[in-house]
Amino acid sequence: GQQGDYTSILLSSPAPGVTQITLNRPKALNALNSTLFHELNAALRNLSSDESIGAVVLTGSDKAFAAGADIKEMKDKQFAEVYKGDFLAHWTELSSFRKPIIAAVSGYALGGGCELAMMCDIILASPTAVFGQPEINLGVIPGAGGTQRLTHAIGKSRAMELVLTGRNFSAQDASDWGLVSRVVSEGSVVDEAVKVAGKIAGKGKLAVQAAKEGVNSAYELSLAQGLHLERRLFHQLFATNDQKIGMTAFAEKKKAEWTHS
Ligand code: CAA
């Protein structure tokens, strides 16, 4: 079945077209070690080629989305080893996943846990969520996007304060600053994320993929380049059946039956 031989993640199917990945190292507050990340990457690779899946929810436990990179695993590593092996490079695989992935965050999302959430497309937060980039307290700095994605999301002054002091911040702060799309009621963050994922999974997959590519390009390109890419993606969708299906269904007051082609 879907679960495969994974030990550090759990896979489930909470709604049609949706896979839920639950980080599952409860004793270590889901600290992100290399086994967990290799399993996560393998699961995402399988989901990429699974035509039946339209969106993914990534979550942890009530206590911790993830308390960061596994400090015990990395504490004795030497420069030559991490540099030659490009330590953490494999973490970036998630950011090239082409289907929407929604982080449902309860409890601690610290260091690599905050960075992992930020690699997702949408973050929903429980009121219990605690975010932070505490790496400065360990004698290092964020190594998987914390200085970059956090700065893009909340601005330089706030990102600087958080990265330089290592202090945590609340779900409400994360929401006020635009890091998360919203704070939901306690105990409902996974259900809410599944609802959003289910809604997305009901859309035409080609348009969804193009939409994700377009929004993500806003972080990579100049405005002129981004607008150009957006218009070309928009034009390209006129080569799909789903564009004809969607617009015809509107004109005929019917429900679109997407063919994802
Ligand atoms: N790595 C390894 N183990 C971790 C861990 C981590 N990041 N976070 C928690 N654990 C382990 C603890 O060592 C403890 O294990 P034992 O029971 O074997 O002692 C277990 O999880 C439970 O943790 P605590 O007893 O500490 O639980 P708590 O409720 O008292 O505190 C916490 C919770 C505040 C989150 C605390 O665990 C903590 O500060 N964790 C570390 C947070 C951190 O510094 N994260 C950044 C990591 S560096 C990084 O992520 C680099 C990067 O950019 C990629």
Image (spheres, rainbow, N blue to C red):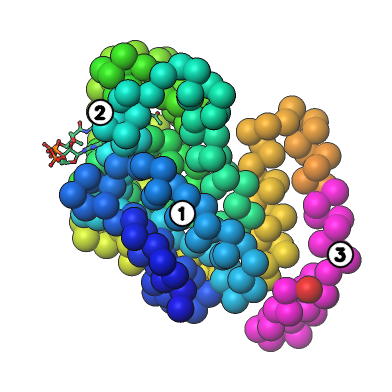
Q: State the residue in front, 93 or 130.
A: 93
Query: At label 3, which amino acid type do we have?
Result: Phe
Quadrant position of ligand 1: top left
* Label 3 to label 2: alpha-carbon separation: 46 Å
Q: Residues within 10 Å of mark 3 (few under 14, many from 20)?
A: few
Comparing labels 3 and 2, the label whose residue is closer to the camera: 2
Relative to 105, say whether 10 is above or below.
below
Residue at (63% x, 33% y) in the render: 219
If the image is split into quadrants, where does the C terminus sit?
bottom right
Of the two numbered discs 2 and 1 in the rendering, the one whose residue sits closer to the viewer = 1
Element type where label 3 sits in the image = helix
Q: CA distance from mark 3 to mark 1?
A: 34 Å
- The residue indicated by pointer 1 is 40
Residue at screen point 85% across, 58% down:
236
Secondary structure under the numbered disc 2 in the rendered image = loop
Q: Residue at x 57, y 45 (%)?
A: 93
Q: Residues within 10 Å of mark 1 (few under 14, many from 20)?
A: many
Q: Main secondary structure of the magenta part?
A: helix
Q: Is residue 255 magenta?
A: yes
Q: Which is more toward the observer, 47 or 86?
A: 86
**Picture disc at residue 168:** 2
x, y percent for residue 25:
26, 52
Q: CA distance from mark 2 to mark 1?
A: 26 Å
